[in-house]
Amino acid sequence: MARISIDPITRIEGHLRIDVEVDGGSVQNAWASCTMWRGIEAILRGRDPREGWVFAQRFCGVCTTVHAMASVRAVEDALNLDIPPNAQYIRNLILIGHALHDHIVHFYHLSALDWVDITAIVQANPARAASIADGVSNWPGNSHKELQAVQDKVKGLVASGQLGIFAHGYWGHPAMRLSPDMNLILFAHYLQALEFQRKSCQIVGILGGKTPHIQNLAVGGVMNAINLNSLATFNMDRLATLQSLFQDLVPFVQQAYFVDACLLGASYPEWFHYGRGVANYLAVPDLPVDAKATKFDLPGGLIMHGDPGSLRPIENWHDQPIRSAVAEDLTRAWYTGQVQQPWKGQTIPEYTNFKPDGKYSWVKAPRYDGQPMQVGPLSNVLVGYAAGHPLTRKWADTAFGNITSAGGPTIGPNDLQSTMGRYLARAIRSAMLSDLALQHWQLLTDNILKGDDTTYNPPQFPQHEVVGVGMHEAPRGTLSHWVVIDKGVFTNYQAVVPTTWNASPRDQKGVPGPYESSLVGNPVADPEKPLEVLRTVHSFDPCMACACHTLDVSGRQIAQVKVL
Amino acid sequence: MTQNSLEPRVAILGLGNVLLGDDGFGPFTVEVFRTQYECGPEIEIIDLGTPGLDLGPYLYGKDWVVIVDAVRAEGEPGTVRTYSEGEFLNAQAQLRLTDHDAGLQECLARLRLVGLGPSEVCVVGVIPESCIFGEGISSRVFAVISVAIDTLVQLLLERGFHCQRRSRPAEAKWSWDFGRRRNDYD
């Protein structure tokens, strides 16, 4: 039995170490260890809850908005404070702008090179590639001329012998199986994605006043001044600019990214059979369409043991079971303590070195009624599909159809419970969010044109202790901030973030977390180049920065694969 | 990237985590610079935090980028130095940013491949004394913020950009708390 240690996993944010035991060409056992210390919540204790979001959005340099949003929602929940419709829609458009940005970056810049072999592009035939791409999509960036130009760039790189940032890919690996033409199409979109990454930042910047780190939030709403007659405020000009940015972004998502994810699924059908792992799924509802947040455009719920029939919908953020069911297990993490409900959570370090039979990670192990849960776009899509949510069904069924017509397997929602399914679900969610972007833009515009310019309801803090939880379905999955407020200051603050659910270590019963269990059964053709392990880990879109919070105690490391 | 941005050709970017002591040097310095100096619309000044691979959009289409950050380099804490792109990519100095995967190098390489990367990047770096969580900027590093600002002014003037000391400082948009030291500075 070979033991492989990959430390750190690259093309993610933060430090993650994965250890796997390989026998007979497949993974038998796995450990996910986060090598950074967590504890940033301590800075929030004793602070005014009205400014908590400003600090919370510095948890991570990438998902700044999501922590800001979860923080204000947590305080509003504790105070039972509704926010005006304009505030809901403005927040929703920020969430959509950020999520589309994040999903595009994940697919192309953080994970495509696990599947796309850049060096094979030199053998592509750009004319043929253009006609293949034209057959599946109307995307205007698939012209022969465009693809020829991309191929010329790659030829230049390869001829120079200086692959630069692409030098460390597993080029020519036996698990790389796209045709040269397909490699060219996907890499062309990889480069085009840079422009759309920028447009989504502009969307967040216009609404949030600045990006990264939006400035417009407030407990009770948003601080955007709406006045259609003023040049200096949020006005029709701004709305028109937003609309045109979304109109540029949506076709890239639906005609390039979504289609590419389908083509990838059609080309790598075996990856619908690997990487299932923990088959309990959690998603919280998001994109509220009314002031009181009673109706949502993204449904929430739980599915247990991979059975869509077990769906328990989470109708809204007042859901009681989730408040008592979530607890963090510290048995195998480098902290003192056993199992803690987040409102009572503590973060006291107890470091022991990496001990596969003992403590081995800075990530805590969140559990729902004692069960590990998988979170992320896959949970979103499975819950929506099981609930018969029309928009989820529309895009999921389109994806299944695309895969079959591109020569791939016939698949259904159950096949999404896999490594490839996580990639596909993220693309399905992005296509859905693209439709919703323009709908929520319309909701905001209509409400403003009706004459409503309210954006804020002032909070009032009671003189006794109150608790709240702020829920948000972030790009990487369910995010919850748990706050305790007494006499107008935070007395406790715990963030249970998506990567904490997914990268969780084992718990007191020895049950592994989603990363760990998804790796078991993964093929590994070459232990020196464990590309297949990266594919499954990257399918979760790991972002350790907020899972353990950016304190680097491990020092500088050079990526290493150790076969022990 | 702020509201009303024209199409700036130059970006002055403050990098670092404002919650980690001297790591907040970059964001803090660029904001103090913005309040003290007036630049033309071709110059964009942003506190970027720790964007990792999300740095790309802020380099996109720029001619010249100046990064202000705490760096890992040999020398006394509080030393301010300007590094060329070659110097920091060859690891003579390491941006603390690179802890979060090599964001800068990757973003530059990708953008240049499509012809949209800046032709020149330099780093105004400070050697930190301590990057401890929640502690604020150390007095040694705090004392050299003005040195870094003078360096920025000199770099801009050398290249012929408009950069003039304001007769009265603009209002600072502090979005975080520097506690005692922030008040000292005001």
Image: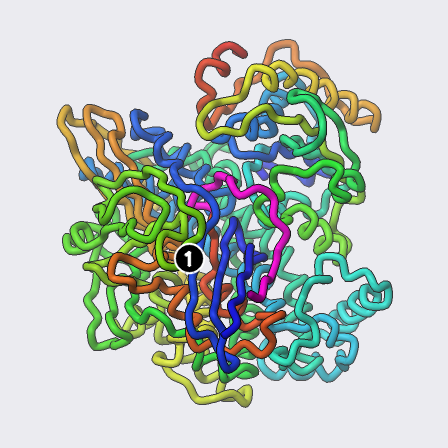
Q: Which residue is mark 1?
A: A476
Let me know if residue A225 appears in the view.
no
Q: Quadrant of residue B167?
A: top right
Image position, residue A19 (x, y; %): 48, 63
Q: Is residue A547 magenta?
A: yes
Image position, residue B111 (x, y; %): 71, 53
At horizontal 70% and vertical 80% (from top left) the residue drawn is A181
At horizontal 70% and vertical 17% (from top left) the residue drawn is B147
Q: What is the quadrant of the C terminus of chain A in the image?
A: bottom right
Q: Say which element carries label 1.
A: loop
Let me know if residue B118 appears in the view.
yes
As drawn, is B93 to the left or to the right of B52? right
Viewer-proximal residue among A354 and A61: A354
Image position, residue A206 (x, y; %): 51, 42
The kind of secondary structure the magenta stretch mainly shows is loop
Image position, residue A306 (x, y; %): 28, 75
Q: Quadrant of residue A416?
A: bottom left
Question: Which range of residues does the magenta coloring cover?
Answer: A545-564
